[in-house]
Image: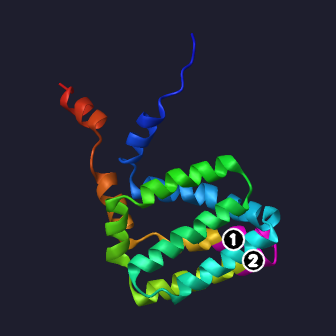
Amino acid sequence: MEWHAPPAVNIIQKLSGVSPIDMMAVRRIIEPRAAALAATNASAGALKEIAAVHSASVAAYEIEAFERWDAELHQKIFAATRNDLLNHLHEMLRLIRGQELWLAIKRRSFSPERRNAYCQEHGALVAALLRRDAEAAAIAIRAHLENSQPQSVCRERLVLSRTPTADQQTHTAMRP
């Protein structure tokens, strides 16, 4: 039997249905390793760009500007890994992060306190990258991802965990 890769269009269409919960789970798997790789593989220029983007995010107080710089910071970190596959995976995550559902969750959870916490967490990450401390970079991004999961996502997880899937509904309906 010959295997055929699914068309890219199908993959992109499926991304539109990815839940924020699933995206955060994947980010918690991928981003700590990407941060560690960036700490060891980044050029001096890439590290300067990461620091500059972090400074821009710290100066951004409105949600739209802050989110743009936040997304750019994560992109620069992936680029600093010098790993094309990781970069492509991150591009898929950015597509999901740019969807209206995710943006609405971020808007609802955004506050000056949360923004300040993100800036501090990003600062710890950037400091670890500049020291080229792979372990500290992985720890910093892991902590950031755990803290950045909006409360709305946690509520959505609870609702989804209580909502039967289509397969479960069909199975239940088929019971005598």
Q: Which of marks 2 and 1 is in front?
A: 2
Residue at 47%, 72% in the rendered image:
68
Q: Name the residue under label 1.
A: 139
Visible in this render: residue 32? no
Residue at (46% x, 79% y) in the render: 66
Marks 2 and 1, how far apart at CA:
9 Å
Q: How crowded is mark 1: few (under 14 residues within 10 Å), some or many (20 or more)?
A: some
Element marked by disc 1: helix
**Residue at horizontal 77 percent and vertical 78 percent from the top:** 130
Whether 111 is drawn above or below 28: the answer is below
Name the residue type under label 1: Ile
**If the image is split into quadrants, where does the C terminus sit?**
top left
Query: x%, y% of residue 171?
Result: 26, 30
Q: In the rendered structure, which amino acid carries the disc numbered 2?
A: Ala
Left or right of 39, for residue 108: left
Which SS type dominates the magenta stretch? helix
Q: Position of residue 85 (x, y in %)?
A: 66, 46
Which badge, 2 or 1, comes first in the chain's sequence? Answer: 2
What residue would you read off at disc 2?
Answer: 128
Q: Which of 165 and 88 is in front in this view?
A: 88
Q: Does the magenta stretch include residue 169?
A: no
- Circles 2 and 1 in contact, beta carbons < 8 Å: yes
Q: In this view, does 85 lie to the left or right of 3?
A: right
Classify residue 65 by image quadrant: bottom left
Does the magenta portion include 134? yes
Q: Where is residue 22 in the image (x, y as percent from the top left)?
A: 45, 53
Which region is colored magenta?
Answer: 127-140
Q: Badge 2, how many Cα within 10 Å: few under 14, some, many 20+?
A: many
